[in-house]
Amino acid sequence: MKQISGADGYVRCAHDGHAVNRLYDLSGLQIACVMPQISFDGATDTYTRRATFIIYALLKNDDGQSMDDELTQYVRTEDAIHKIFTYLTEGENNQGCPPFPLINIKGITIDPEFNEFGGWNGYSITVSI
């Protein structure tokens, strides 16, 4: 994800508290991937497996920054999330050949984030498969 998004770093975490610890002393554009949540629906012989994962593109919040600087921060992180979205849905070659052809993406949501994980701003992409 680091190479795809142009980020300065990448961390993997299990939950919010874990992400706070992982991001604590980092700077620059960071990609934080939350390990997938897996659930099962249905009866024991006919169940459906569902998984959801979240990827964040974040920059450290600067309380003294101007509104223009904050907007620039969001534009940079949004660009990183859109690169990840394109990679997940179309692949790097833009020829409609996704990198994970056996994974059926059921839904994608992109959200702005403020003051996440102890003071990080940016965007997140939630993917349901």
Image (cartoon, rainbow, N blue to C red):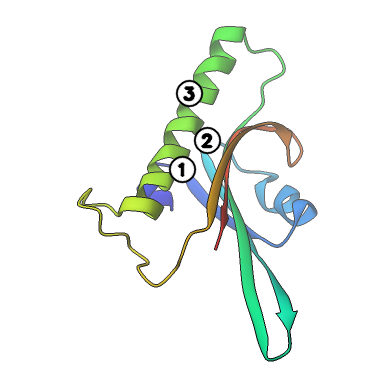
Q: Quadrant of residue 41?
A: bottom right
Per the image, label 2 sits on a secondary structure element best described as loop
Could you give the CA–CA distance between mark 1 and mark 2, rounded to whole angstroms? 6 Å
Q: Which of marks 1 and 3 precedes in the sequence?
A: 1
- Residue that label 2 marks: 28
Q: Which corner quadrant holds the C terminus? A: bottom right
**Residue at the image point whose x is 71% and y is 62% from the top:** 14
Query: Foreground: 53 or 11?
Result: 53
Mark nearer the viewer, 3 or 1: 3
Left or right, residue 14 beside residue 105: right
Dot 3 surroundings within 10 Å: few (below 14), some, or many (20 or more)?
A: some
Tag 3: amino acid: Val
- Residue that label 3 marks: 75
Left or right, residue 18 beside residue 108: right
The image shows residue 67, relative to residue 126, as above or below, that is: above
Dot 2 surroundings within 10 Å: few (below 14), some, or many (20 or more)?
A: few
- Residue that label 1 marks: 8
Could you give the CA–CA distance between mark 3 and mark 2, rounded to whole angstroms? 14 Å
Residue 107 lies, in percent from the top left, at 54, 52
Mark nearer the viewer, 3 or 2: 3
**Residue at the image point whose x is 42% and y is 38% from the top:** 82
| Dots 1, 2 in contact, CB < 8 A | yes
Residue 17 lies, in percent from the top left, at 79, 53
Q: Is residue 94 visible?
A: yes
Q: Which of marks 2 and 1 precedes in the sequence?
A: 1
